[in-house]
Image (tube, rainbow, N blue to C red):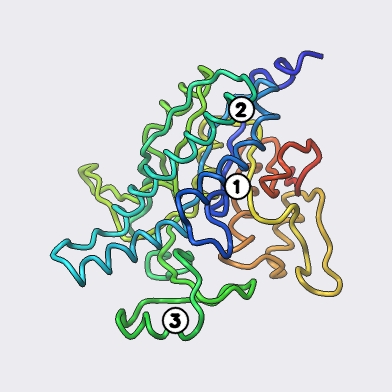
Amino acid sequence: MDKQKIGMNKMAVIAFGGNALLRSGEQGTYKEQIANVEQTCESVIRLLEQGYHIVIGHGNGPQVGNVMLQHEIASRVTDVPAMPLDFCVSETQGSIGYLIEQGLRNILAKHHIKRNIVGLITQVVVDKNDKMLLNPTKPVGPYYKLKQMNTFLANNPGTPFKEDPKGNGWRRVVASPQPIEILNVEVIEMLAKAGHIVITVGGGGIPVVKDKYQKINGIEAVIDKDLASALLAVKIKADEFYILTDVPKIYINFRKPNEQPIDTMTVTQAKKYLSEGHFTEGSMAPKVRAGIYFVENGGKECIITEAGQLNNENCGTRIIK
């Protein structure tokens, strides 16, 4: 069977995790990030060879925190003012989109595949009355040891932190409202259906609100990239939704003697595991919710897996109806 025909007319949205560029223990140099992103882009080749239309979303948790830190330090030692969080998200959309495009072009050339790649700066609308704006939960930036965190708080009192459930340290947290509208989504769908690879909703999208006159304003928040990518996947009528993370499958009873990997779970099962507390906030819970949202709103299946496993047709944990 001609590989180019297997997935013809199918649409896949792939959400790259922040670790697609910056991994634990790394400094985040340009050389490290471009090497990481090329490895991640290599995993997309199977879908491209099968003729899928591809749209890529991506996280920015480590990067946007670093940009915020750079702004804060610069504002203390120079006259350059720090920019608000929505502006920092836009910066990382551009820089990460550039890295993904470059990495993907190099991988496409290696495999002799010709596709145009389009990166879009994307604003995502949230409700100005979303209760999550008053409850910071989204981790951003580097991990801190306890002593490092206390030093940071001495210079930035009141900054909210939460401990990482995997034991990596402490990270800053910011508000993470629910995405309700993706601006230019019709353009994204048109470009993807024309065969172009689209990089969009970077970092979950630049968070904006609309007033009664439909005027748009940015806000201090970060939208979860998996939820934004799920909304995008629904709006462009994607067949499959991939969430790339740092583990090959989802586990229940994670890191316990009776931990168990899950190959497939229905929406009903996924909701049950969520209610039982098997998936932690700031880690796997938002990914499972995003998968549930996609499948409940017309998607065929959501696959949550490690980037390096994507070339395996039986990879990951699948959420189905």
Q: Which residue is mark 3?
A: 148
Of badges 3 and 2, nearer the viewer stands: 3
Amino acid type at circle 2 is Met
Of badges 1 and 3, nearer the viewer stands: 3
170 in relation to 319, above or below:
below
Q: Quadrant of the C terminus?
A: top right
Q: Is residue 315 left or right of residue 193?
A: right
Query: In which image quadrant can residue 26 be found?
Result: bottom right
List x then y, in percent, for residue 201: 44, 42
173 in relation to 85, above or below:
below
- The answer to which of 45 and 221 lies nearer the viewer is 45
Rendered image: mark on residue 7: none
List x then y, in percent, for residue 286: 58, 58
Label 3 SS = helix
Q: Is residue 186 left or right of residue 15?
A: left
Mark 1 or mark 3, earlier in chain: 3
From this viewpoint, which residue is outermost toward the right?
A: 258
Q: Could you tell me how far apart the alpha carbons at marks 3 and 2 are, in whole angstroms? A: 44 Å
Rendered image: mark on residue 293: 1
Q: Which residue is mark 2?
A: 11
List x then y, in percent, for residue 230: 55, 43
Label 1 SS = helix
- The answer to which of 83 and 148 lies nearer the viewer is 148
Query: In which image quadrant can residue 71 be found?
Result: bottom left
Cβ atoms under marks 3 and 2 closer than 8 Å: no
Q: Could you tell me how far apart the alpha carbons at marks 1 and 3 are, in whole angstroms? A: 38 Å
